[in-house]
Amino acid sequence: MHDPRQLLDPEVDAAAKLRRRGYVLDTDHLSKLVSRRSSVISEGDQARAESKKAAAEVGAAAKRGEDVTELRERARELKNRITRLEEEQREVEAELHEFLLGIPNIPLDEIPDGATEEFAEEVRRVGTPPEFDFEPLDHVDLGERAGILDLGRATKLSGPRFAVFKGAGSRLQRALAQFFLDVHTGEHGYTEFSLPALVTRQTMTGTGQLPKFEEDLFRTGVADRELFLIPTAEVPLVNLHAGEILQLEDLPLRYTAHTPCFRSEAGSYGKDTRGLIRQHEFSKVELVQFVEEERSREALDEILSHAEAPLRKLGLPYRVIKLAAGDTGFSAQITFDVEVWLPSQGTYREISSASDTGTFQARRANIRGKGKDGKRAQIATLNASGLPIGRTLVAVLENNQQADGSIRIPEALVPYTGFAVINPDGSTA
């Protein structure tokens, strides 16, 4: 959550920066809320001082044997006024808090203008897309022909945008998750967590999913207890430290987890409805870092390289783009997308996003830092997909298909799958 003083600081010019991402900051309303809160706090402090003085006068007059009726009435009026002012303060602070929760992060100056991917800045391409001497199939045709993917039965069980995997398909999913976790824990120094998939409203609010994205979340309630299914492990990983003070000498903290993810995909009807690109339920390995605010931009380059590493090891061609201001996520101040090549579409599609949220999430979740000298510091959080299982499986199937209908498994993955080829009939070798 933002510091309202920063939002109103002419030198920061937050309103102009937020306009780059299509958000119009109502500075007049914000100024009135801040001014009202300041006024109420000041009046409350004055009333408490007067009340303390009145109580002392009542005591002194009583000791002298004087009539204290009027003094007591004055003291009672002051206490009633304090009660009213405290209630007014709670109301204005709640209104200010709600207003601030709806304001997205301020984009960094370095990211390009624009509202869609066409305005993104390409940073690099890695690998060469494969060339086929036959018409490549998409992952749905490849998977269903081999009997390792069944979308029809998934629809029967749960409706559209779910998937059932079988045999080598299930083994490949499990292998990808283990491979990603081994790379990130063994080579990049991340600590692995196992986490709940159901979290509270407060937890969702801490990372910025609420209140803005409520319609895109799955919500459940048991015995009048509201819980949300996580859209990404970023949510519980960041909020592990909600309300805590981190010791600066322990930073950076690097966390990872493999979890199911749930998204209603509200507003995306008809988009990528075929196959595994856009599912209501999928699994993903997530990366999160906690660093000092001054290190966040450096840490972003690092976490991006960590997200890219599995793609390099799997030999999958991809590119990295820097998103435009209007296409950057609500909580991020800068985002790099990693897009993998999909032969069936003849283009690159998003497989990971690496974002620096600056202090945005830490402020919302009340995560602070402190050095050995007792000096307080701001904490920044970063996140990246490292990687989603389903979309990576799509890329593996499509980029490694053969003319005879078989699919070759990348060499780095063979120790995890136990096979090097998926044959057209679903058998392995």
Image: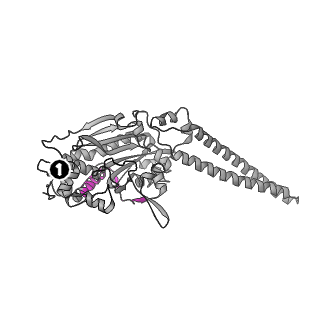
Examine the rendered structure and indicate whether residue 17 appears above or below residue 134. above
| Span highlighted in magenta in the image | 173-198
Residue 282 forms part of the magenta stretch: no
Residue 178 forms part of the magenta stretch: yes
* Closest to the observer, 230 or 191: 230
Horizontal side of 110 relative to 13 (left or right) equals: left
Q: Does any portion of residue 80 appear in the rendered image?
A: yes
* Closest to the observer, 232 or 304: 232
Secondary structure found at label 1: helix
Horizontal side of 312 relative to 100 (left or right) equals: left
Q: Residue at x 37, y 48 (%)?
A: 268
Residue 83 position within the rendered picture, expressed as x and y whole percent measured from the top left? 70, 55
Query: Residue 126 lies in what quarter of the image?
Result: top left
Query: Residue 10 lies in what quarter of the image?
Result: top right
Q: Identify the amino acid type marked 1.
A: Glu
Residue 273 position within the rendered picture, expressed as x and y whole percent measured from the top left? 31, 50
Q: Does any portion of residue 370 appear in the rendered image?
A: no
Residue 155 position within the rendered picture, expressed as x and y whole percent measured from the top left? 30, 59
10 Å crowding of disc 1: few (<14), some (14-19), many (20+): few
Q: Residue at x 28, y 57 (%)?
A: 163
Q: Residue at x 47, y 58 (%)?
A: 200
Residue wearing tag 1: 411
